[in-house]
Structures are given as C-alpha cells and as structure tokens.
Image (tube, rainbow, N blue to C red):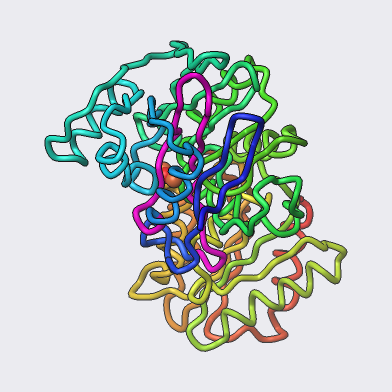
Amino acid sequence: MYCTRKITDDIYWIGASDRRLSRFENIFPIPRGVSYNSYVILDEKTVLLDTVDYSVSRQFIENLEHTLNGRQLDYIVVDHMEPDHCAVIGDILLRYPNAVLIGNTKTFNMIDQFYDNMKYEKITVAEGDTVSTGKYTLRFVMAPMVHWPEAMVTFEETTGTLFSADAFGTFGALDGVIFADEVDFDRDWLDDARRYYTNIVGKYGAQVQALLKKAAALDIKTIAPLHGPVWRRDLDYILDKYNKWSTYEPEDKGVMIAYASMYGNTENMANALACMLAEDGVSNIRVYDVSGTDISTLISEAFRVSHIVLACPTYNGDIYPVMENFIKDMKALNLQNRTVALMDNGTWAAVAAKKMAAAFETMKNITVLENSLSVKSVMFASQEDELKSFKDAIKASI
Ligand code: FEO
C-alpha cells in the first residue's frame, strides 16, 4: 500500500522510514529510526527529487508509482549522492529509462563511482541554473560539504520550496505526520536534530554558513529536507538553530559534566561538583558517564552548552581512552567557543588534566580554566575547599 503526503498542490512527499536500522551510517544509534525523504513534482514534466536508502526501496517505489499514476518520469534531481539517497537511482532508471538525471559535475563523477557503466541521459547544472518543468521552475544552488562535495539544494521558485538535501534534516522516523508544525519539535525532535547536525555536518560550519547566506536571498516558504519533518511554519526557529550550530555558538548557558570512572571515585568527583554548582544556583547542569553514553550524544551536548567539565583517570600515563576519544571527536567536528574545566584522578601519577589541556590548546577558541582539580584515588572532605574554588571558577565564568 502506498504511503505518501501532499506538500502543496503538485508536490508530494514519497519517502519512507526505517525503524529497523540500529545505527545510521553504521555509527550513530537511531533508537527512533530515521526517515529518507523523497519528493515528486507533478507538472507538465514530472520530477523526482532524490531517491532513498535501499532498505526502504520497496515502499518508495510503490509510493512513486502511485504518485505518478501512470505517467512517465521525466527528471530525477540528484541533490546528494550519499547512498542513503542515491541507492535506488539505478532501479528507477530501469523502470523509467527515459528519465533524465539532473546534477552537477561532481554528482555525475560520483554516479559513475557508485554505478558500474550505468547508461543515463543527464543535464549538468551549475550555481543558479534553472530548469522549467511547466509552471514550476527549479533553481539549483550548490551546497558543497553540506554534507559531501557534490551536495546541492533545489529551490522551486513558484511555491518557494527549498529541497534542502541533508541540511535541516534530523534522525527520527516519521509517524504519518511529516510537518514540523504537526509535532512538538522542541520537545520531541530537537535533541535528535542537534545530534544529527553536529555529528554529521558539524565539521562544516563555514560551508553551512555559506549555504545559509545563499538561502537568505531566496523567498523560502517551505524547507523540505532529506531526513525528518518538513518546515512550512516558524522557519526562523530552525534557521536560528542552524546559525548557532554552524557558528559554534552555544545554544544554552549551561554545564555539561562528562566523567569517565573506573571504580566510581572519579564519578564521585563529578557528582560532588554538580551538587556544589547546583547548591550555588547553577541550574542547567547535566552529568554524563562517557563510558556509557554514545559519543554522538556527548558531541551533541558539547555543541549545546557553553561550559564543559571533563573528569577522568590517568591511564597508561595518558588520558583515559574513552575521554581521549571524546576530545578527539570534538576536535574533528571543529567545536569552538567553549569554556572547559578539567578534573583528573591518579593513584600514583595524575597527568590526565595536563594532557587534556594540551589537547584543547590545539582547538580554536577554547578557554581552559586555569584552576584544574586533581585527586589521588579518592576525593576526601579535606579537598572540599579545593572543590569549592574549582566550582567558583566555573560559576564565575558562566
Ligand atoms: Fe542523508 Fe549525507 O546523507
């Protein structure tokens, strides 16, 4: 049975959701699943905008056939060549061999990398080129590195619909409702949207900024991404989030305390600090066990808050491995503009705080508070004043 939604009179969502896949890109846990959005425009010419992941291809093809209702497919716009969107192009061409692919030069290089000797007709577009489909006009806007080099977005000028590729996407399966104004996005979707953005596109803030500047010149009424809900109201809400994330500005003044603990003693340091901060009136605090929290959640939180406290044991004369991995990922994703405070633990030679500070020195615009806190094995009440002064330094910087 088909499963489609109407976006406007002639534009349809024909995507599908996967609730079986446990990890997106085989890395990121997706307990709420993920949607692969695809769209059709019915005009004098018919247009398919991107395909889907192979896992949902059966539903997708049924949706496409139902929506075309016996018509031929004229164009396939390929905004993004990652296989979660391009995997079904070959199958679609087998069914609709006269469909013409629309992409940029890099798109077609990648098509020939993913598909061995596939024969197809193509229209190669560059920045600002347009294709008329009858009453509608598609304008192509290049969006390199959002999230791959070939990525582009397609703006339909009459309806003001921006087919935004990965931009403005989020993890999470769609539950029949596909518009952001049909759900409580802030309550139910924002965390997954942030986790999706920061882990997948987070590194490319400058390129996202470049796309946002181009988008600002368009009269956008609807944003139709390749994952998650479609935006037709409150566009400023999601544009503001993207602006913050891509300029590496914190969303919230708050403290993330991320600890790694082998036997609970470093965990106790984190909890004691959290209690002391809260007792002193700091309310936006969250504590995470780095060993037990997926790194995509840690990264998402690091992008959300203004202050990050890291606490870990010294291990093999270095930073405890899971914490080292977290710091490495923050650097890889280009996190900036944060204040960091460091605690370490070591039964004989605590060096983790010093090593963590050195790692942060290689990142942009990270302020590491001078006042770090070191514990030998277990924090006793005799270190209360030291902990208090560590807490005071954090509070003063908020
Ligand atoms: Fe949803 Fe970069 O692919």
Q: Which of 332 and 89 is in front in this view?
A: 89
Residue 162 locus on image (x, y percent): 58, 27
Residue 152 locus on image (x, y percent): 43, 27
Q: Nearer the viewer, residue 371 or 182?
A: 182
Q: Which of 96 and 18 is in front in this view?
A: 96
Can residue 24 be seen by looking at this rendering? Answer: yes
The image shows residue 251, relative to residue 243, as above or below, that is: below
Residue 205 locus on image (x, y percent): 51, 34
Q: Which of 46 and 142 is in front in this view?
A: 46
Q: Residue at x 78, y 67 (%)?
A: 277
The image shows residue 282, relative to residue 271, as above or below, that is: above
Residue 340 locus on image (x, y percent): 60, 54
Left or right side of 116 for 181: right
Q: Which residue lies furthest to the front in this view?
A: 70
Rendered image quadrant of residue 389: bottom right
Asked if the stretch drawn in magenta spans residue 51, the answer is yes
| Magenta highlight range | 30-56
Q: Which residue is drawn at 49% across and 55% down?
A: 357
Can residue 333 be seen by looking at this rendering? Answer: no
The number of callouts visible is: 0
Left or right side of 99 for 156: right
Asked if the stretch drawn in magenta spans residue 341, the answer is no
Q: Residue at x 38, y 14 (%)?
A: 126
Q: Residue at x 57, y 65 (%)?
A: 32
Classify the position of ligand 1 by quadrant: top left, top right, bottom left or bottom right: top left
Rendered image quadrant of residue 297: bottom right
